[in-house]
Image (tube, rainbow, N blue to C red):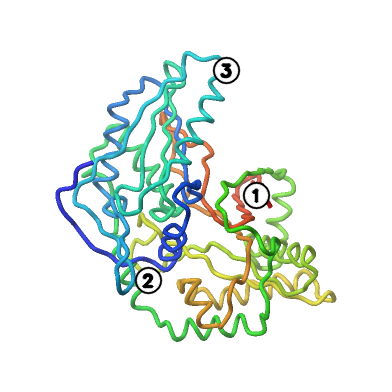
Amino acid sequence: MTRSGIADILPLSPLQEGLLFHALYDDDQSPDVYAAQQILELTGDVDPAAVRAAGQALLDRHPNLRACFRRRDAGRPLQIVPTDVVLPWAEADVSALGEREREAAWQRLLDEERARRFDLAKPPLLRQLLVRWAPDRYRLLITNHHILLDGWSKQLLVREFTALYGGEHPTVLPHVPPYRDYLAWLAGQDRTAAEEAWQDTLSGVVEPTLLVPGAPATTVLPHEVVVELSEKLTATAERTARSLGVTLNTLVQGAWGVLLGRLTGRTDTVFGQTVTVRPPELRNVASMVGFCINTVPTRVRWDDGDSVADLLTGIQSRQSGLLPHQYLGLADIRRATGTGDLFDTLLAFESYPAPADKGASRVTQLTGRDATHYPLTLSVLPGRSLAVRLSYRPDV
């Protein structure tokens, strides 16, 4: 890895600060729960050199992919962007193995890459492993620290990688707005108004909603259960949401909040929710690659005499009022509201940009693995069949 100098020094977004805090106080010998993985399948006459060149072009094109993160003796931490970084690259070959042995070898590679920790002070916090699966089939494993990218940005990068690998020159790709514009927008927000909004939202919350009180602080890589709902049930859910004038995300929030209430014996619950913070007033923000998300509390409360319609329309009304204030970091929300830990479960409704038209593309995206440190995370992936992924700590 070579670095010829510093191109930029940037502040951190609120959730980046939170992730950095957790990462710095993690045991260096424990697994890195913030290592996220993305898998692309490449078919046809695959040229490893071209794959590597496309990956390097993404690093060269997006400065914040080259960022590292440093603490300071006083004041908030910074992200430092070098001018040049060489893409960490490795190759492996499992094509000569039988089907079962090949799958086992692939799983070992996935686990080894996930367990290999990133040093946040040493860029880049991203690496690639190209695995030869068969003579005309490869798998590209992209592992990155969660602090670099949100899910939306990963889809944008898949589009760009596909174009670059297909022979497009980086200079003909669409202009990408700089991530520093987003950080400047964050710095210019009315924090007093946001703090007051969260104080009102969490008024009366006297204790956290915990499914696993006293969970050990040790780091454990999560296990996953994935369930795909039928197209019929998915369509029914969407139709129900439309008939009530709410989003499918709101329906999921209501169901999750009530389930937490049943499990904890209460009718006022709080869980964490991953939200996209891409303000429409920021030009071309939908094309921005970076970390434009936040984790905020979501409160669901009801009386047993309420109708489902009352519950869901109430949730959507409150969430709509909070939209301008969802940028405020969780630590700042806690300080403003005088609350401590509010929840130990996380909900992520993963709505991403539509994939590019594949056409004759030789690049296909496979299911990857995301990062979370909560004991229980529910990820919902909309589509013709709604997919639900439950990530959980196996030790609790």
Q: Which of marks 3 and 2 is nearer the N terminus?
A: 3
Indicate the amino acid at tag 3: Glu
**Where does label 3 land, which residue?**
99
Give coordinates of residue 306: x percent, y percent. 81, 75
Give coordinates of residue 305: x percent, y percent. 85, 76
Q: CA gap, disc 2 to disc 1?
A: 34 Å
Q: Are marks 3 and 2 in contact (CB under 8 Å)?
A: no
Q: Which residue is drawn at 37% across and 71% down?
A: 281
Q: Residue at x 59, y 65 (%)?
A: 272
Q: CA gap, disc 1 to disc 3?
A: 28 Å
Query: Is disc 3 surrounded by few (<14), some (14 to 19) or many (20+) residues within 10 Å?
Result: few
Number of numbered discs overlaid on the protein picture: 3
Q: In this view, does 357 lie above or below 345?
A: above
**Where does label 2 land, which residue?**
281
Does residue 165 appear to the left or right of 193 in the view shown? left
Q: Earlier in the sequence, mark 2 or mark 1?
A: 2
- Which quadrant holds the N terminus? top left
- Which mark is drawn over residue 37? none
Q: CA gap, disc 3 to disc 2?
A: 51 Å
Indicate the amino acid at tag 2: Glu
**Where does label 1 land, which residue?**
390
Element assignment for label 3: helix
